[in-house]
Image (cartoon, helix red, strand yellow):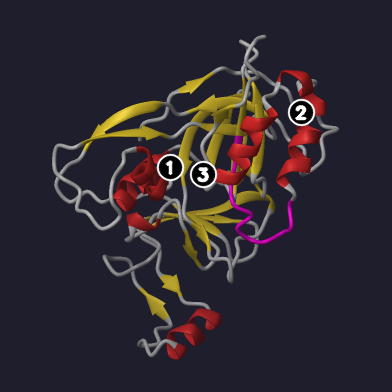
Amino acid sequence: MRYVIACFLVVWSAASSAQTLSGIALIGSTFTYEVKAGDTLTRIGARYGVDPYLILKENGLQASGPLKIGRVLRIDNRHIVPALLSDGIIINLPQRMLFRMRGSKVDKAYPVGLGRPDWPTDTGKFTITSRQEGKTWFVPPSIQQEMALLGEPVREQIPPGPENPLGKYWMGLSLPGLGIHGTIAPESIYHFQSHGCIRLHPDDAAEMFATTNKGDAGIIIYEPVLLYVAPNNKIYLEVHRDIYRKGIDAKELIKELAASARVDSTIDWSRVAEVIAAHDGVARDVTRAAD
């Protein structure tokens, strides 16, 4: 996983509301990636936390064209880390990212797969209540019903192995029915395709499993708009789709964030409009150019 963590600055206070959070750090980078055998835009995007359509667009590729082995792609996976915890796990749903905080710094950042719009992942504070390697999946009745409706074999449980959707590692949460786990479908990472649980790439699941304990705390939030003021006074804006249709007004929210950070006069508002329209999920520089 390639994430460069930079520019740490706390600009959030306990007085901030649930939808007026500024960021504390900018992670990721702009880099080049050489296409390998078996690569697809979906797989590359899933691994690096970037929308495959954006890779397509920024590299001038055709949607119907195959990826050529050896082709060098430009990847931009910069993300703003929301400020909420000094230690623990932050999962931002629209952002499709999990951040592991240690000592008020970003220790790890992973792209995740989340609940479908018709089966959304819950928000709220949680603790890790269980950890298990090779967990049997006891299929909930609701998912059994879905299997039946789709004409699939209805299974009550799936033992550990290559057919188990939970992958090799499971970290159960105190939020009912939710867990952080690996997957047998790594291309589903950075998408909304699960029944609510939080999927990690198998390598990331193994790494996180090795560094977490029962009782570790975290929070799942819904923040499609993030603003970050870097130490060099550059202003970054990251806008995602309102995937669960909560009716969030990105423009008004950005005005609140800018006012809170006292950067109203140093933002390029025409650039802000472009970032809102694109809602491509990458942190973009919206600093107003000097006169």
Q: CA distance from mark 3 to mark 2?
A: 20 Å
- The residue at the point 19 percent across, 53 percent down is 66
Magenta portion: prevailing SS class: loop
Q: Where does label 1 land, which residue?
A: 49
- Does 232 appear above or below 11? above
- Does 203 appear above or below 136? above
Q: Earlier in the sequence, mark 1 or mark 3?
A: 1
Percent position (x, y) of residue 6? 51, 19
Q: CA distance from mark 2 to mark 1?
A: 26 Å
Which amino acid, by three-letter code, is at mark 2? Ala
- Helix or strand or loop: what does disc 2 sit on? helix
Q: Which residues are magenta?
A: 238-248
Q: Residues within 10 Å of mark 1 (few under 14, many from 20)?
A: many
Percent position (x, y) of residue 109? 48, 35
The numbered mark at residue 258 is 2
Residue placed most toward the observer, 68 or 222: 68
Find residue 176 and report its image quarter: bottom right
Q: Quadrant of the N terminus?
A: top left
Q: Where does label 3 land, which residue?
A: 280
Which amino acid, by three-letter code, is at mark 1? Gly
Q: On the rendered structure, is 118 left or right of 151?
A: right
Q: On the rendered structure, is 166 left or right of 286?
A: left
- The residue at the point 28 percent across, 66 percent down is 161
Find residue 163 and report its image quarter: bottom left
Q: On the rendered structure, is 260 left or right of 85?
A: right
